[in-house]
Amino acid sequence: MIKNKKICSRCIYDEHIPNISFSDDGICNYCDQIDFLKKEFGTGKKKGHKLLKNLINKIKKEGQSKKYDCVIGVSGGTDSSYLLMKAKEWGLKPLAVHYDNTWNTATASMNIAKVTKYLDIDLFTYVIDNKEVNDMKLSFLRSGVPEFDADTDIAFVQILRQVAANKKIKYILEGHSFITEGISPVGSNYFDGGYVADIHKKFGKLKMKSYPNMTFFQFMKWILLYRQKFIRPLWYIDYSKEEAQKILIEKTGWQYYDGHHLENRASWFTHTLWLPRYGTDFRYLSLAAKVRNNKIKRLTALKEMKKPIIESTMLINYVKKRLDLNHNEYKSIMNGTKRTWRGFKTYKKRFEILKPIFYILMKLNLVPVTFYQKYCNKID
């Protein structure tokens, strides 16, 4: 425990956060990044509404003769569900796409069904073979790296891009908000398709036949050949997660799942049981975001962070049964060697070398700002 640790004078990030720095006023660089994004995207301001309106009009115009003009990834969570509702309100013709890693909670599955039915939006679901995904999950546990659910994130994006390409759709809308999600510290974790492949090659047993990994060349193909654009509409508007949940519940019967990213058991395990082994507490992100947005007092957030993370016995038993681990095997994994992404093959060096090119691609909205910052800059 760090005594007398330096804490940001605005949020609750402290000096143990990776790659943090403080201004003379004691404000951390992550708060500065939030301010930059707010200014750049005009979040909740006239500028933001105008930028978003122009984007929506462009999507409508280019998709005028098509059944769908955009693709939206859905998980059953608040942000993606609300984005579907807003897309319909804006007059867009979205195709909802879900990557089912077979670890979904019943609540998440029902939420997806309720929202798409209420909005009369078509849903495409890709389901991976459950034996393959279990082998992948065991691979990450055995490797000892923090990114237990990296395979889901990579596969979800790959499926979104594949569906968009098959349907000849250029625009992929993502339900992410830096206002409510905060800024993930640079260096706290890292993953790409090369990383996922190397982890599984070293620790997996089954051949991946249904897992949709994304190689470096596929990634470049989606960007350069298909010119696919990821757009985050919630970056432009004054978005409130609490208000979004209220609207979803009232209109669709959507249900809350009692925590950030807890709609899927793999992400639930990652946040509450696996990442704490590495000293990573994702409550920092959401609580810091609430403090920055005056949703809660800074002191209240700091007190909340002192509370222990609640471990679910039900979740532990589910993971043991799902991955066929007895008590001793599970305990051995949880107490095993901790490793980082630096010990495995990744595409990180390629992204860094191609940084000038990705800067141009970022300006053309072909890669998100957050991708450029995390993947193209060197991580200390």
Image: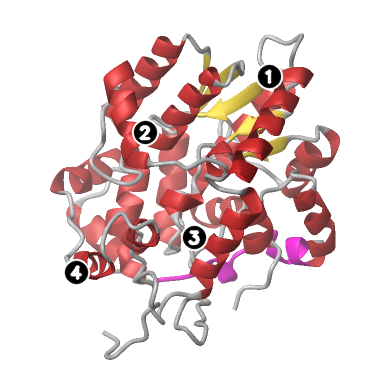
Q: Position of residue 251 (x, y in %)?
A: 32, 17
Q: Is residue 93 magenta?
A: no
> Measuring 62% from the left and 62% from the top, which residue is drawn there?
374
| Mark with earlier residue (4, 2) | 2
Residue 189 appears left or right of 314: right
The Cα–Cα distance between marks 4 and 2, rounded to whole angstroms, is 26 Å
Residue lying furthest bottom:
4
Residue position for label 1 = 69
Q: Residues within 10 Å of mark 3 (few under 14, many from 20)?
A: some
| Mark with earlier residue (3, 2) | 3
Tell me if I can see residue 187 in this picture.
no
Nearer-the-camera pick, 374 or 248: 248
| Mark with earlier residue (1, 4) | 1
Q: Position of residue 267 (x, y in %)?
A: 37, 46
Q: Amino acid at mark 4?
A: Lys
Nearer-the-camera pick, 94 or 49: 49
Q: Position of residue 332 (x, y in %)?
A: 27, 64
Q: Amino acid at mark 1?
A: Asp
Q: Which residues are magenta?
A: 338-352
The Cα–Cα distance between marks 3 and 4, rounded to whole angstroms, is 21 Å
| Mark with earlier residue (1, 2) | 1
Tell me if I can see residue 283 in this picture.
yes
**Could you tell me which secondary element the residue under label 4 belongs to?**
helix
When the figure is inspected, residue 238 is found, relative to residue 16, above or below; the finding is: above
Report which quarter residue 141 is drawn in: bottom left
Contact check, label 1 and label 2, Cβ < 8 Å:
no
When the figure is inspected, residue 226 is found, relative to residue 28, above or below; the finding is: above
Residue position for label 3 = 183
Q: Amino acid at mark 2?
A: Ala
Residue position for label 2 = 244
Q: Quadrant of the N terminus?
A: bottom left
